[in-house]
Amino acid sequence: MEAFLLSFGIIFVAELGDKSQLMALTFAARYRAVTILIAITAATALVHLVSVVFGAVLGAALPTDVISVVAGIAFLGFAAWTIRGDELDDEDEVRAARSDRSVLLTVGLAFFLAELGDKTMLATITLATKNGLFGTWLGSTLGMVAADALAIVVGQQLGARLPERTVKVGAAITFVVFGVLLIVEGIR
C-alpha cells in the first residue's frame, strides 16, 4: 500500500504539465474522453510495467545507499525538467491529428511512444528500485491516468486558462523535496 500511495502521488505530480498531458488535451478536442482514457490507461500500464521490471533489476544489482543518492539526484533533475516544461513538437501534433486509424490505437500508440524515456517513466523506474513492484506499477499507472483525466476534464471546462506556471512550480518543489530526502537517506 505504501508503494502504491507513494507512486500514485509522485507520478500524479510529475504528470502535471507534462507533454502527455498536453497530448490528452489535444485528443480531447477531437475524440470522446472515455476512448482517450482507455487508450492512455493501456499505454501507461504497459510502459510502467516495463519501468517497474527495469527498476527491480537495478534495485537488486545496486546497494541501497547508492540507489537512494542516485534516485535523489534523479528527482532533482526531474524538478529542473518540470520547470523547463514540455511542449508538443511537430511529430506529436501529427500523431494527435491522425484520424485514418482507430482512435484507440492512435491515442494508445501516441502515448506509449511519448512516455518512452519521459520523466514519469524514469520516476517509475526510480521508485521501483526500492518499493514493491505491484504497488509501484499500479500507483504510477493510476497516478498518470488520474492526472491526464484531470487535464481532459479541466481542459474541456477552462480551455487555455490553466495556471501552467503554478502547476510547474508546485511539481518542481515536490520533486526537490523528495530528491533531498532520498539523498539524505542515502548519505546517512
Image (tube, rainbow, N blue to C red):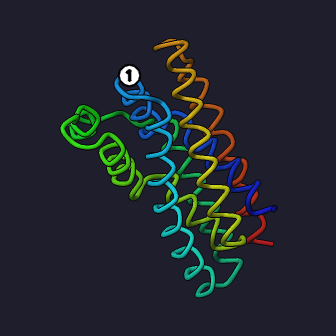
Please say if 158 is above or below 29.
above
Which structural element holds mark 1? Answer: loop
Q: Is residue 58 above or below residue 104?
A: below
Which residue is located at x 42 percent, y 38 percent?
Answer: 19
- The residue carrying pointer 1 sits among few (fewer than 14), some (14 to 19) or many (20 or more) residues within 10 Å by Cα, namely few
The residue pinned by badge 1 equals 29
Q: Residue furthest left?
A: 100
Identity of the residue drawn at 56% across and 36% down: 16
Q: Nearer the viewer, residue 106 or 115?
A: 106
Q: Percent from the top left, x then y, of residue 162? A: 54, 17
Q: Quadrant of the N terminus?
A: bottom right
Q: Callout 1, which amino acid? A: Ala
Front-lying residue, 11 or 73: 11
Q: In this view of the protein, which residue sits in the foreground, 26 or 115?
A: 26
Q: Residue shown at 81%/72% (left/top)? A: 188
Viewer-proximal residue among 45 and 73: 45
Left or right of 158, for residue 84: left
Q: Is residue 61 above or below residue 107?
A: below
Q: In this rendering, is residue 29 above or below 119?
A: above
Residue 137 image offset from top left, x and y in percent: 62, 63
Q: Position of residue 152 (x, y in %)?
A: 51, 27
